[in-house]
Image (spheres, coloured by chain):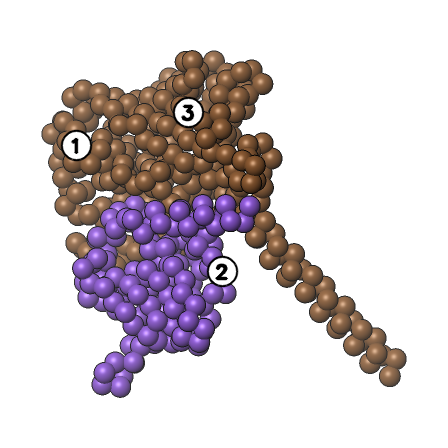
Chain colours: A purple, B brown
Amino acid sequence: MKTTFAVCIVAFGLLLGARSAVAHHAFTAEFDASKPLKMTGTVTKFEWTNPHTWFYLDIKNDDGTVTNWGFEMNSPNQLLRNGWTRNSLKVGDVITVEAFGARDGSHIGNAKAVTMTSTGQKLLAAPSQN
Amino acid sequence: MAFATRAVRQVRISIIALALFLGMAGAARAQWLSLPLPGTPRTPDGKPNLMAPAPKTSDGKPDLSGIWHAADNRYVDNLAGEGADVPMLPSAAALYKHRQETLGQDKPQLHCLPHGVPDAMLVSMIPFKIVQTPRETIVLYEEFNQYRQIFTDGRALPQDPNPAWFGYSVGKWEGDTFAVDVAGFKEGTWLDNGGHPHTEQLHITERYRRPNFGNLELEVAINDPGAYPKPWKSAIIHFKLLPDTELLEHLCENERDAGHLGFK
C-alpha cells in the first residue's frame, strides 16, 4: 500500500515538474525560467502558509556582506505530498536551494529543490505554479 | 520529599502524554495522506486496480465519487487546447489580449478569489473530490476549500439568480454521461488561466464520464453570446483518480505574490 501511494505521489510530483507556466499566479509574471539559481545559506524564517510557502535565507555575498533572500514554493499540501512537514526547515539550518530567479532581479526565487547541508537530504520543493 | 516525588511523577505523566499525543498526531497525518479506502477494487498485490470497472450507485448509475486531479496541465492555459484560437467578440478579445500581455497579473486567485468553472479543475496538482448522492453531486475543490453543488433532483436552473462565482448547477444522466448545466455566473472569473473571459450570459454544459475506476473524462461547452459569436467546446479533459488518500485543508491565508509581479 505504501509503495502504491509513494508511486502515486511521485507521479503526482512529476506533474509539478513538467510545468513551467501559469496556474495560481503566472510563474512567468514573477519568475524567469532562464535564470536558474543555486545558492547556499542559513534559514532565517519558514512560512508554512497557503497558497504558497516561503522560506528566507541569509546568503553571504562575495564582498562578505549578507543578503536575505526569499524563496517561494507551492502550498503546504503539495509539499506534504512530496514528503515535507512544517518542521522540514528550521531557523539556523544551512541549506542549498535550486531555484528560478525573479524577473525584476529582486532577491527572491521560486525553489525547485532544497538540500540539507548536514545530512545531504534533498527535498523536491514543488514549484509554486498553482 | 513526597511533594517532589509527586511533581516528578506528574512531569513524567505529562511527558508520556505529550509523547503519545505527538505519536498519534504523526500517525494521523500519515494515515490521512495514505490510507486504504474501502470500496477500492484491488489487484492481487493489494494495489488499487485503476482499470477495474467504474462503480455504480444503488440505482444503477455510474458513481463519479472519488478524488480526482487533471491528468496533465494542457488545458490550464487554454481550455480550447494549446494554440487553439477561439473567435471572440471585440470587447472579449480586448480583455483577453490584455490578460495575455500582462501575464495574468490581475487574475482573481491572486486575491484569493476562485478559479471558477471549469478552471478550478484544470490544474493537475490541485485535486478535487466528487461526492455523489441521489439528489445532488457535490464537488469539493481542495484549493481555497471551495465547493459546488450540482442538483439532480429535477429542479430547473434559477431564473435571474444573484450572480455567483461558481454559478448554479443542475445535472441529469444521459446514459453513462452526467450532463450538467451551469448558469448564473458572476462576471469576473476566468474560464482558464490564459484568461478566456465571460459575461453574466455564460451558460456552461459539462459532460462527465467515468470509463473505469481510475479515469474520469469531461467535455465543456461554452455558450456566452456576450463574449463569443458562437458556442465552443473544450477537447476531452482527462482526470486521474488519486486512490487511498484524502483532501487536505487549503485556505488562502497569505497571498503575497501580487507585490512581486512584473508589469506594475
Furthest toward the front, the residue is B44
Within 10 Å of the Cα at label 3, are there few (<14), some (14-19), or many (20+) other Cα atoms? Answer: some
Determine which of the numbered discs, if any, sits on residue A85 in the image.
2
B192 lies left or right of B69: left
Residue at image point 56% right, 15% down? B59
Residue closest to the far right = B2
Q: Chain of mark 1?
A: B
Q: Residue at 42% across / 50% down in the picture?
A: A10
Secondary element at tag 1: loop
Kindly identify the amino acid type of the residue bearing the numbered disc 1: Ala
Please name the amino acid that badge 3 sits on: Pro
Q: Earlier in the sequence, mark 1 or mark 3?
A: 1
- The residue indicated by pointer 3 is B211
In x, y percent, where is residue B133?
Answer: 54, 24
State the SS at label 3.
strand
Q: Chain of mark 2?
A: A
Indicate whether B23 appears above or below B171.
below
Name the residue tied to disc 1: B84
State how far apart marks 2 and 1 are (Cα): 40 Å
Residue B151, x across and y down, in percent: 47, 21
Q: Residues within 10 Å of mark 1 (few under 14, many from 20)?
A: few
